[in-house]
Image (cartoon, helix red, strand yellow):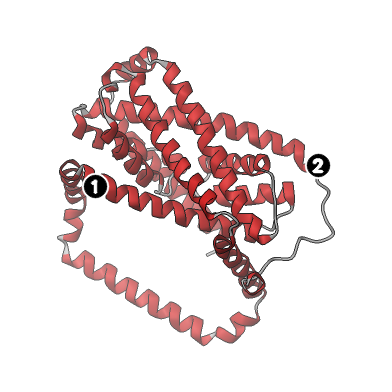
Amino acid sequence: MQPNARRGIQLGVSLVLGAALLWYARRVIDPTALTARFREADYRWILLSGMLSVVAYWSRAERWRLLMEPLGYRPTTFHSALALMSGYFANLLLPRVGEVTRCGVLYRLDRIPVNVSFGTVVAERIFDLLMLLILVAFTFVLELDRLGTFFTGFFHSRLAPVFNNLSVITAVAFALLVGTGMLSFGLFRYRRAIRRSFLYAKGRNFLRGMAAGLLSVRKLRSPATFLFHTGLIWTMYYLMAYVLFFATPQTAGLGIRAGFTILVTGGLAMAVPVQGGFGTFHLLVGNVLVLYGLSLPDGIILATFMHTSQTLFVVLMGGLSSIVVLFLRGKHPSPAQSPPVPTPESQR
């Protein structure tokens, strides 16, 4: 299958999935109640959430910049922030293109090779994944009764028919086994031709650059500063959601524990390859808020409120960043050739 066709299918599936989940979540909401909730909201709390977002995104840009220093590249925090917000903006249009977009923007601004900066993106994603897993474990211990009941019931009711069907499980397992065997045979049979191909050489160089980015964590001048920014980012993520509780009377009574639950549930929802978490965020967060005394419509309304405010902020800041990049790119003349790509061996 051609790459463009494959990307088109992935985009189509993502759009359909997001639209279906959003429709499923919104069908229990009274549009009049949703409009009334937005009208009665205290937008000072939304403004505060936006200010906390600025701190989080600045800290993320600075942390990304720190990862590139050991590789010999020193972009400014401003350029890193522009690239970061442009990537977030791109993610609203196409799923999972934000990482590549931010690396491409940074190449235009500071001529940092995409494969190197992408390796640092992978490195910071690994740390964020570890933070999310730690928070998931902490929140499950904190709210074991509520979350255990929720996730057991939520997934069991939807997946039980599939797992109870032995023929479906057998067919999927057989297909995976056959597919893995055919792929392994093909790679082994044509390994010499593959190694001589242009794509193999390009892929090898790209992976070397990524490895250099990953290994940059070991070369940090100040690991404590990196960890500080990681903690600050996730603290701001928590506060961004928590302060929105006070924007409406119906949710002002939700406590600190509910904030942790929404943080981890929202993080899991945003990990689904759907543009901007549309549908997945509303469905998961709306359902989990039922555990804290809200009705399902009120839970989904709050999820919609939170998601909409954050999405509008990303559209505003990401759109402005993309425009600024267009004006800045002409101020950096293109070099005769890109800087050499560091390899893991050169970093030792």
Residue 82 figure quarter: top right
The mark found on residue 302 in the picture is none
Q: Position of residue 6 (x, y in %)?
A: 51, 58
Q: Residue at x 57, y 29 (%)?
A: 316
Secondary structure at badge 2 equals: helix
Label 1: state its secondary structure: helix
Q: Residue placed at 18% from the left, 45% from the top?
A: 144
- Confirm or deny contact between disc 1 and disc 2 (CB under 8 A): no
Q: Please indicate whether residue 253 sits to the left or right of residue 122 in the image.
A: left
Residue carrying label 1: 140
Residue in the picture at 39% in, 80% down: 181
Alpha-carbon span between mark 1 and mark 2? 50 Å
Report which quarter residue 330 is drawn in. Answer: top right
Q: Is residue 18 visible?
A: yes
- Name above or below for residue 230 compared with residue 301: below
Kind of residue sitting beneath label 2: Gly
Give the residue type at disc 1. Answer: Phe
Q: Which residue is mark 2?
A: 330
Q: Residues within 10 Å of mark 1 (few under 14, many from 20)?
A: some
**Quadrant (top left, top right, bottom left, bottom right) of the C terminus:** bottom right
Residue 69 location, x and y as percent? 65, 55
Instruction: Give the mark nearer the N terminus: 1 vs 2.
Output: 1
Q: Exactly how many numbered labels are in the figure?
A: 2
Pick the front one: 68 or 190:
68
The answer to whether residue 52 is above or below residue 87 is above
